[in-house]
Structures are given as structure tokens and as C-alpha cells.
Image (cartoon, helix red, strand yellow):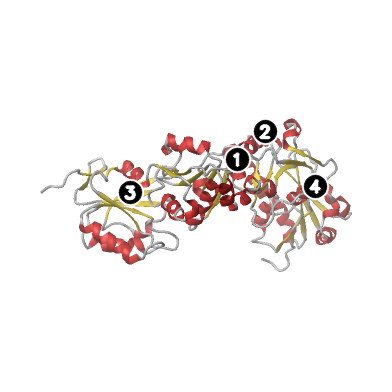
Amino acid sequence: MSSSSGHLYGVGLGPGDPELITRKAARLIAEADVVAYYSGTHGRSIARSIAADLIPEGVVEERLVYPVTTGTTDHPGGYEGAIAEFYDASARRLAAHLERGRDVVVLCEGDPLFYGSYMYLHDRLAPRFPAEVVPGVTSVSAASAAVARPLVRRTDVFTVLPGTLPVPELARRLADTDGAAVMKLGRTFEGVRDALAQAGRLDDAVYVERASMSGQRVLPVRDVDPASVPYFSMILTTGDDAPRNRGLTTRAHTAGETAASGRAAPAELLVVGLGPADERWLTPEAARALAEVDHVVGYGPYVDRVPVRPGQRRHSSGNTVEVDRARLALDLALAGERVAVVSGGDAGVFGMASAVFEAAQDPRYADVPVRVLPGVTAVQAVAARAGAPIGGDFAVLSLSDRLKPWEVVEARLEAAARADLVIAVYNPASRSRRTQVARAREVLLRHRPGDTVVVVGRDVGRAGESVEVTTLEKLAPDSVDMRCLLIVGSSGTSVTASGAVWTRRYVPD
């Protein structure tokens, strides 16, 4: 990086009102040697129009005209290829000025690094030249001010979503957050409206068009004509209006009082196994239950797998708060709410069923009936992919020592190995647990020969699944992670000529 190089500035101009340009942005524009800005194929630049009164006479202007915006292109690399080539060429144009020691200001509506096109120039030029980003008021901030309502408060979660997401994905994310901003509308508006309806957020969603500019419009999403929606518009949903915040906390925390007063009888709490992958392995019984409940409670990735239903409230949480999750579900059921607690695989196999029954030991939940709906287990899925490795007696163990000492894990492995059982190993490793597989292998090799068959199933039923057949001696512990399940064979386990793994049903005398 030459000391004589010019400086590159990505300058945020705010959402459209020139009075929202920061003093620093105004100063840099006035002092620039070169002012650059993007424009559509029509040649007009919104960024330049916002900063027009600040651009000094005689300054060099670089207009970066997109080769394509919403139309088609005959570029051999398609849209992505055409745009990448355009950014490369634009960067070369600006680099020529920077190499001559000229300071270049790139004008950006909103904030340069918030869905801003400046970032693609920054990627290409910042490693070579001094570069600084000047933040700007975002369009989300301007839209919130136009609506004049708080987006989120206290522990609410706020999510920014592009309207270009597939409708089911958008609906899921809208259902899983408190406040949200959906950007990039225009031609995506009708799909976004469908997603809002699926997530139960259509009634509280507000449409904001050209926030802070002349022609600003604010109206309920239900009242918007899809044909009139420009690109510079967005939809807001606020945390106060999120289904989970509409009196939900009060109902759950006063559940005992509600039930005691006779205003609502406790509802049956369902604990549902989702199976190990997608809806192909979700049982019809579980699917019907999930379609009928008003609340879904569970670990975030599992809640994400439940199809969104209008008005259904979703309560996602982290991976180490199982009993807290169970108490929330029991509180809701005690208040008469229809609730499903979800688990991957089968809820009764290292899943939420035990946590629910543990929490339900509290006498205040004595009147809440709990029903467990079974699911396909991970070991069944991996075994089926491999052949029939659990066709004989087998044991199921978890290598996680989060809820039991490692000495107990090791003793149980030893006992299963001595008994010559096939062993299915759940939770073999995680980011923080990297030694257990190697230690388990050492224990097993004390009682099993090195050529004992081992199946390593990874992400079975999901994209990128793999099933590897190896031996205990050749098993590479470092290749095993939390997405894996291991099946360690017994003396009765073998591999066919075609590679299928199976265990005989009988034990010879």
C-alpha cells in the first residue's frame, strides 16, 4: 500500500432526506477529488440526487452504470457473472484515481455496509488502498421513524430479512422473531405477503414506501396494491405485536391462578419426535399434532423444521436449557394452551421427553397430562442406510459427559463391549468435546478385535449425508463430529460383498 495513494471513502448518505446526511459525510464529499456513484441503466442515480447540493463544482465524477438490474442478460456467467465483471471494472476505474493520489468518495444511499453496493468495491480495493467507511442512517431506521413505533424492546429479537427468500423460509423466520424488517420488495411483495399470513403476522405488518423521501407512504400491508410497490420500500413488524408478546408471558406466569379459578382446564402437553431429517421421516401422527397445536417449543434448529402455521407461536431456545423449555411448555399447557415440545429423532431417546417428565415432578403440574408421540430415531436411520447392523441385540449410549461423569460413560462402554453387543453411539463429539471418540475407541479395543465393523453416519437424511463403513482399528476420531452417529458391530456383524452391513439374529452356542 503506497503512502502516496489516495483514500477511498464509502460514505453513507442516509435513506433519502438530505438533512439526514451526517456532518462527516458532507465534509468528505466537499473535499473529494473524485465522487463516484452507482446508477441504473437509465443513468439516474438516487445517491447523487441525495447529495447533489454537496458535490463541488469541477470535481471528477465517476458514474458506475449497472449492466443489468432486474432484466435478463446474455452474459455467459448469467446475472452473477455480469455483476462480478461490472464490479471488477468499476474497481479498476477507481483504482486508477487512487494510484494517482486522488481521494475517492463513493456515495451510498443508506449505510454502505447494510445491503449496500459499496461493499463490493471495498472488497476489491481496501486491501490495496487506505479505506474508510462512514456510516449512514439506514432505511430501517427511517421506516421505523415513519411508523413512529418501537421496533423491539428489552429482550426482543429483531431480524432483517430479504424479500427474495423462498416463501416457506421467510414465513419460518418471521414466525421465529419478535420484530422484523423485510426489504427488497417490488416484485417479491405478493410472496412476502403470503409469508406474513403463514407466520400469523399479516395483521400487524406495516408497509413503508420511500421512507424520509418525498412521496413517503405508510399503510397496512393488507391495503397495499402489489402492482404499486417499488424497490425502495419495506415491511415492518414490531416486537410489541409479535404473537409471543401479546399477553403470552402474563398468561404463562399466572397459569396456576388461571387453572385454580376454573377459567381454563389444563391442556394435554404433547412431546413430539420429528425424526432425524425432513418431513419424509415425520410420522402422520406427529404431523397432525403439529398442525393442531397453538405453541411449538424446542431447540431452535428443531423448531425450524416445523412447518409454519398462521397464528401458531414458536418458542426457540438454546441447546442446554432443556428443563427451562419443559417448564415453559408445562406453564402454557397448565393455562389451557395447546402445546407441542419437539425433539429431533425420537423425543424419548436422548430427547425432550425425559426433561418434560423431570420438570413435571413439580406438584403444580400434577393436573397436566403429558403424551409422547414417537419418531424415527437417528440410529434407525443410519442402520437402514448401512443395511441391518442392529438386527441383533444392541445397546444405545451417549458419549456426552454433560449430564453424567465420563467415568460412567466409560464403564457402560466397557460393559456393552464385554457383553458383545452392537453399540450405537450418540453425541460422539462436539466443538468442546474432541477427545471422547479416541478414548471410547481405546476402551472398545480392550474387548473387541481391530477388524470390528464400524458404521459412521453423518447427516443421514439431510443434504450431504454420508455413510462410511470402516473398522475399529481404522476409525479416525478426528473425522467424527456432532453430526455423526456411530454403530460399532459385534462378533456377529459382517459386511456383504456389496458393502451392506448386517448382524445375525442368533448367537451360536
Q: Classify 450 as above or below 149.
A: below
Q: Which residue is mark 1?
A: 171
Horizontal placement of 51 versus 179: left or right? Answer: right
Q: Which residue is mark 4?
A: 146
Horizontal placement of 398 versus 203: left or right? Answer: left
Structural distance between the alpha carbons of marks 1 and 2? 13 Å
Q: Where is residue 328? Give x, y as percent.
A: 53, 52
Assign a secondary structure to mark 3.
Answer: strand
Viewer-side residue, 307 vs 451: 307
Residue at the image position 28 percent from the left and 59 percent from the top:
413
Assign a secondary structure to mark 1.
Answer: helix
Which three-letter amino acid code belongs to the residue tagged 2?
Glu
Q: Is residue 472 visible?
A: yes
Q: Which residue is mark 2?
A: 190
Residue at the image position 44 percent from the left and 50 percent from the top:
352
Extreme residue toward the front, this view: 261
Structural distance between the alpha carbons of marks 2 and 3? 45 Å
